[in-house]
Amino acid sequence: MLTLKKNTASLLADATAKLFGEGLLSADEIFEMLEYPPDKSMGDIALPCFRLSKSLRKAPPVIASALAAEISCDEFSEVNAMGGYLNFRISPTAFATRVVSDIRAAGEKYGSPMCGEGKTVILDYSSPNVAKPFHIGHLGTTVIGHSLKLLHQFAGYNCVGINYLGDWGTQFGKLIVAYKKWGGREQVEAGGVDELVSLYVKINNAIKDEEDASVAGMPEGSRKHSALADESRAEFAKLEHGDEENLALWRWFVDVSLKEYEKTYKLLGIDFDSYLGESFYTDKMPAQVEKLRNMGLLEIDDGASIVNLDKWNMPVCLILKSDGTTLYPTRDIAAAVYRKGEYKFDKAIYVTSAAQSLHFAQWFKVVELMGYDWYDQLVHVPYGTVSIGGAKLATRTGNVILLRDLFDEAIKRVYEITREKHPDEDECRAISEKVGVGAIIFYYLSNNRIRDINFVMEDALCFDGNTGPYAQYTYARTCSILEKAGECGEMTDAPLTEVEFELAKVLSIFPERIKSAIAEYEPSVVTRYILDLCAAFNRFYHDCKIAACEDKDLRSSRLALTAATSRVLKTALGLICMQTPEKI
Ligand code: ARG
């Protein structure tokens, strides 16, 4: 549609120049005015001429009929003036032929806006905190982040995916104390990150108990105290000063956790170009703090060093605590400066929950105040919260749903549903994995990212709803039709009906959708597109004989449309991290 819309705009620009004089309206301006009428009986594309009447100084109906008489193009079967509107009806066969030939020519690149050539985008996403659970709250950053990477890659950007592991901080002091008190090498080796998380939960509870006991019977507002918390701070200080034993423990904890995360990433088909976590930036922060101080941007507030952001209606940005230790924003600033030097990015995208929006707005502003002229290349992409409804999932570690458990549950359920159809156990397992994981991704990415969602496993897995399994099933259907027919067909002159035309229109709109998905940092645009395409294809499948069609030419065109659908579905599903099994 985009191509046709562009061509239409340039035809119209030529016609207006000829009829009303040169230089009044450009093709780009006309392009912006063109609409897809909601009522198909009007036509397929429309130009509301009242938008032209100001520049052309004529009444809209006059403009519409003059243009209608002037325009001619093979791809239009009719050009009509109706009141102030100029309506274009597209010739289905000519249009579908061009769309299918565009798709064949571009192949796996069909739909790419090719706007990223020679540019670098870095994406900071997933980034779990070591020894804290990798839970359902991380689903958003992981799948939105990776889809955005795939979309940018598709557009030709050079992309760097960064997992900014939360591998530093006071939680390691606590973990070291807990491990020395209650842990053991074998338990951690056997239990992996779960064991670390339960040690972490245990010490947090113990600290809370000590704190509560310390103020029991004391007047309101008395200072709480915990010996375990003191010990934890001391162990973290030792770690920061390079204590060998603690450093070795820390490295081991990080390794154990990473191994576990990698299992989940593998299931999702995700990999990262860099795992440089928070710890890497420890020695890179002093230079930035120094710069802030030299520029007079730091103020002392209750012993802490802060940047005042009153003028921008934001609370202060904390740079150093009163004890001189650094904070989350300090680390992000140092990391951004380092990454700019390392990757010379044109854009740096950070995907986190909306709860961190203020944090990003604050430190982006500080980067600007520091005079870094690339501050406007930093982009925060927030998403809403996820809660769980319906499915019963074990909460082994505290009150959270682990991401891995969520996927395991989905895989198990798909396996139960598909087991009888698949005599081959291994094949069934492989398919269940692709469909189960895909169901969760698709369900999650069906909503605008900023919306809060309530996750209902039953809905995600429903084979005949607007779900991942349904989309994958539709793709598998295209594959099996083509395989049975033994050919991919060619477009012919056979007249096409409305359903085929609708399918071609949906196929033709793919490049426009990809463009908006990238511009809005919104993978759900792709998900919704997939649903539109599946609906159009399934209508076509139900109404038309494809491989069994008696008319040779019509059969060939229909197979060509099926092959084009198959190609576009595969690309689109791939862009939202979905696998595309050819059989289900
Ligand atoms: N580790 C953080 C968390 O789990 C997310 C990090 C996001 N990236 C960043 N550069 N701050 O909340």
Image: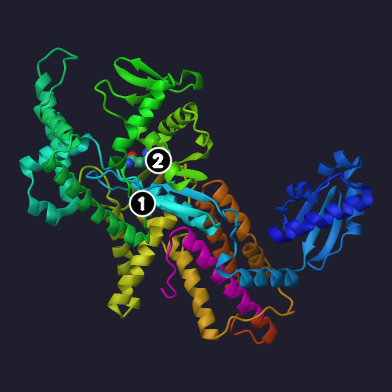
Image coordinates for residue 205, horizontal then vertical, percent: 14, 35
- Find the distance from the CA under tag 1 to the CA under tag 2: 13 Å
- Neighbour tally class for label 2: few under 14, some 14-19, many 20 plus, Cα within 10 Å: some
Image coordinates for residue 301, horizontal then vertical, percent: 34, 15
Magenta stretch secondary structure, dominant:
helix
375 vs 294: above or below: below
Image coordinates for residue 110, horizontal then vertical, percent: 59, 65
Assign a secondary structure to mark 1.
loop
* Residue 329 location, quadrant: top left
- Neighbour tally class for label 1: few under 14, some 14-19, many 20 plus, Cα within 10 Å: few
Nearer mark to the viewer, of 1 and 2: 2
Choose between 338 and 378: the one closer to the eye: 338
Q: Earlier in the sequence, mark 1 or mark 2?
A: 1
Segment tinted magenta in the rendering: 557-584
| Residue 353 visible in the snapshot | no
Label at residue 274: 1
Left or right: 540, with 459 as reference point? right
148 vs 421: above or below: above
| Residue 502 visible in the snapshot | yes
| Residue at 38 percent of width and 39 percent of height | 335
Quarter the C terminus occupies:
bottom left
374 vs 130: above or below: above
Q: Amino acid at mark 2?
A: Tyr
| Residue at 38 percent of width and 30 percent of height | 288
Label at residue 338: 2
Q: Amino acid at mark 1?
A: Ser
Ligand 1 quarter of the rendering:
top left
548 vs 566: above or below: below
